[in-house]
Image: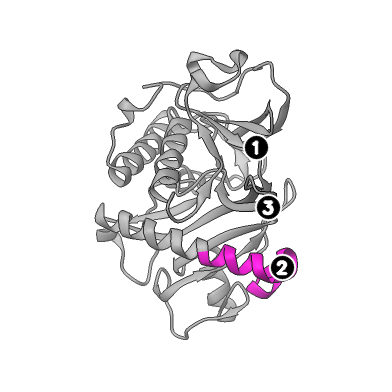
């Protein structure tokens, strides 16, 4: 099992180190994204990496970029090491890299929800609304909504939390036309992904899309989907057979880590507690199973295996 927790110096300008990804300037309006095996829980990055997690995130994103290409374009140029600048062609990064067009990212997260869960359930339970918008009465935890909802949020500054906002607030932030386009394309992507997931025995409860603008070659701009797409880190996947209204099923993501941490007397601030080997292994199994079952491919066949 391949593991990369800290991305090495690639001889390129290092722009950003996120909880999971490192971002480099690859020149010519191109960016290099490297997905590590870092894992965060409760906004704290754990010391222990999850083997192959970065490969899963990259493989799933590449898969979904292709699946959604007729719905919306994307920022991906290549996931092949051979296409990277020479200093970045490191064997340990195989399967973890995406060379991308630089996009002017929208200042909102484009979230779509088909079920009321997570922060949406907390808000609904206390106020009867979802992202400040009217919602049907009488819903219970994990209930299916009458139709998928576009529920945007702001992008938080480092250390802060994203803020759920109304569609009207999204219009104020990006303008009416762009907000309408973002909503329409997010709902279309969600519909396609839900259909594919359900065919594999999963429910896509909700997901977060990142959209941005790139030059269209004719002096204008094109709206594209960027960053990661429909991965376990950005989406809530449930086994269809595990779902029943009234309780949120286990997710195919880092739930084993969350469950373990909730048993501890930890204040959810750094430094993080040590994760037992069995919790790390169980989490890796969730990520690999999500890719292989939802995308219908073996991770062994993805670069770096």
Question: Residue at coordinates 53% horizontally, 34% vertically from top-left?
Answer: 77
Q: Which residues are magenta?
A: 165-184
Quarter of the image containing the N terminus?
A: top left
Q: Which is closer to the viewer, label 2 or label 1?
A: 2
Of the image marks 3 and 1, the number of the one nearer the N terminus: 1
Residue that mark 1 sits on: 18
Mark 2 → mark 3, Cα distance in angstroms: 17 Å
Residue 105 picture location, percent across and down:
67, 50
Disc 1: CA contacts within 10 A as few (<14), some (14-19) or many (>=20)? few
Disc 3: CA contacts within 10 A as few (<14), some (14-19) or many (>=20)? few
Residue 232 picture location, percent across and down:
44, 46
Does residue 93 appear anywhere in the picture? no
Residue 131's disc is none
Question: Residue at coordinates 67% horizontally, 38% vertically from top-left?
Answer: 270
Mark 2 vs 3: CB contact within 8 A: no
Residue that mark 2 sits on: 175
Residue that mark 3 sits on: 220
Q: Which is closer to the viewer, label 2 or label 3?
A: 3
Does residue 289 appear anywhere in the picture? yes
Mark 3 vs 1: CB contact within 8 A: no
Q: Main secondary structure of the magenta part?
A: helix
């Amino acid at each position: 099992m391949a593991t990369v927790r800290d991305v090495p110096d690639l001889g390129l300008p290092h722009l950003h180190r996120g909880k999971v990804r490192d971002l480099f300037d690859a020149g010519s309006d191109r960016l290099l994204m490297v997905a590590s095996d870092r894992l965060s829980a409760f906004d704290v990055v754990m010391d222990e990496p999850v083997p192959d997690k970065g490969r899963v995130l990259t493989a799933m994103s590449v898969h979904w970029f292709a699946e959604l290409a007729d719905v919306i374009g994307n920022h991906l140029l290549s996931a092949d090491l051979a296409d990277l600048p020479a200093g970045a062609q490191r064997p340990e990064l195989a399967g973890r890299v995406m060379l991308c067009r630089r996009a002017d990212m929208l200042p909102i997260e484009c979230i779509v929800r088909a079920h009321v869960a997570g922060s949406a359930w907390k808000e609904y339970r206390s106020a009867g609304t979802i992202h400040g918008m009217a919602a049907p009465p009488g819903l219970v935890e994990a209930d299916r909504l009458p139709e998928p909802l576009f529920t945007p949020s702001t992008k938080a500054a480092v250390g802060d939390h994203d803020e759920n906002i109304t569609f009207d607030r999204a219009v104020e932030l990006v303008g009416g036309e762009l907000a309408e386009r973002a909503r329409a394309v997010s709902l279309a992507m969600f519909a396609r992904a839900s259909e594919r997931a359900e065919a594999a025995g999963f429910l896509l409860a909700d997901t977060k899309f990142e959209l941005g603008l790139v030059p269209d070659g004719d002096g204008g701009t094109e709206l594209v989907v960027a960053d990661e797409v429909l991965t376990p880190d950005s989406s809530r996947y449930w086994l269809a057979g595990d779902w029943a209204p009234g309780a949120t099923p286990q997710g195919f993501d880092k739930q084993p880590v969350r469950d373990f941490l909730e048993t501890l007397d930890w204040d959810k601030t750094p430094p993080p507690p040590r994760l037992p080997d069995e919790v790390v292994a169980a989490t890796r199994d969730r990520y690999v199973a999500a890719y292989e079952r939802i995308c219908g491919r073996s991770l062994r066949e993805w670069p770096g295996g």
